[in-house]
Image (tube, helix red, strand yellow):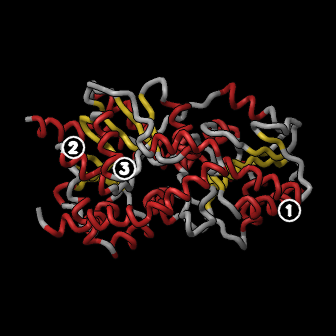
Amino acid sequence: MKLSEIFPRWLYYFGWIIALPILVLGIIIHIIINPKQFKPYLKRLGIILPKPSKKNNIWIHAVSVGEVAAAANLIPTIQNNFSNDIVLTCSTITGYDMAMKKLSDKILIHYFPFDFPLIDYFFIKRVNPYIAIFLEMEIWPSIIHSLYKRNIPIFLVNARLGDTEFKRYSIFKKLFNPILSKYSIILCQSYQDKERFNKIGAKESALGFTGNIKYDLSTKVNTENKFNISNLLNELDKRIILTLASSHSGEEKLIIQSYMVLKKDFKHLQLIIVPRHPHRTSELETILKENKLPYTLRQGETNTKSDILIINTIGEMMDVFDLSDLIVMGGSFSEKVGGHNIIEPASLGKPVIVGPHMENFRDVVNIFKARDAYVEINYDNLTEKLWLYIADNNKRLILGNNQYMAVKFNKGASRRTANEIKKYMLNFIN
């Protein structure tokens, strides 16, 4: 084994050891602040492991909510091609909760282990994977090396490299090259992603293009749930519901201020806010109280109806989208976040507008722009642009339809991904 391959991995392990006291302290503080984190940390530390399995399972890893949504599209096509049971892991509480809500009746769900040799050794032994599938952008030196040593095929699917990640990985290209070379196949969302992976060290022969799995999402809406959500808002004739989806700190204040101005012209306008992280609900409540705005919580003590609703639950986004007349996508006003997935509301034909920062979704943006299905607003024209779409139902319908067609004509990535994995495994076995 070459030194150029061993050195980056051992440097990574050394970094782990140095950071261990800070990590332990951080975990303790995190648990004190949020006791619900206790059990997830036990799972991530390998103290609580999945049930032992004698079968060869398919291990799929999806970091958080967006990746879980993609995994939910991919899993049925994997099950159609392989008879193995599936184990899905997540890194975040929101991702885990969503997976439990949507997929726990079909597959086993667990937390992703910390990327350290002893922890991942026992985890992999328990899961006993036949193949390992990681979604989007997953480079875990210890786990990938452990799988590779056991001759377990490793697939990176729906792979993407945003601008920030590409710059970061390019700087440390020599460190990541040995890790990327251990992937059996890297199936990318776009040709630009494929080119970027190649530039940071992935082998050309291992790279493929299959498109974005998120275009294949199910548009199933829970009508009863949608009705229950609708019932929490004041009953107004000809009401228009504006939704701020997957919002981050600072974005709610921006939209709330705009809403207060718009409300003067549109008395029937209502606002739904879906924070990306529900634990930030108290922060949103503070902003609304400061502006003396009555509000209702989807889940909690505030049960009176109002014109503003905070969705402080997980797994109800599609129901909220279907209820909405106009959507502003959160994360798109933050350069640090770089936007969130606009495919979900578009798949329902619901018009979605974004802020100036969609750097992590350039390919999606280009596809939507090509179909005249992309509307961007900035801090200066936010209220003005929203006014135009709130005032004109026809304008909303045209945008929603164009976005729906952009999604419709880009489906099929899940099937192509499963076919590529199956093709590789047939050659691997033979």
* Residue 136 % position (x, y): 39, 52
Q: CA distance from mark 1 to mark 3?
A: 41 Å
For residue 261, what is the image quadrant? bottom right
Disc 1 crowd, CA 10 A, few/some/many (<14, 14-19, 20+): few
- The residue at the point 62 percent across, 39 percent down is 314
Q: Earlier in the sequence, mark 2 or mark 1?
A: 2
Disc 3 vs disc 2: which is toward the camera? 2
Image quadrant occupied by the C terminus:
top left
Q: Earlier in the sequence, mark 1 or mark 3?
A: 3
Establish if 5 lies above or below 117.
below
Is the C-beta separation of discs 3 and 2 under 8 Å?
no
Residue at numbered disc 1:
261
* Residue 418 % position (x, y): 29, 38
**Residue sitting at the far left:** 430
Residue at numbered disc 3:
158
Q: Which mark is residue 153?
A: 2
For residue 424, what is the image quadrant? top left
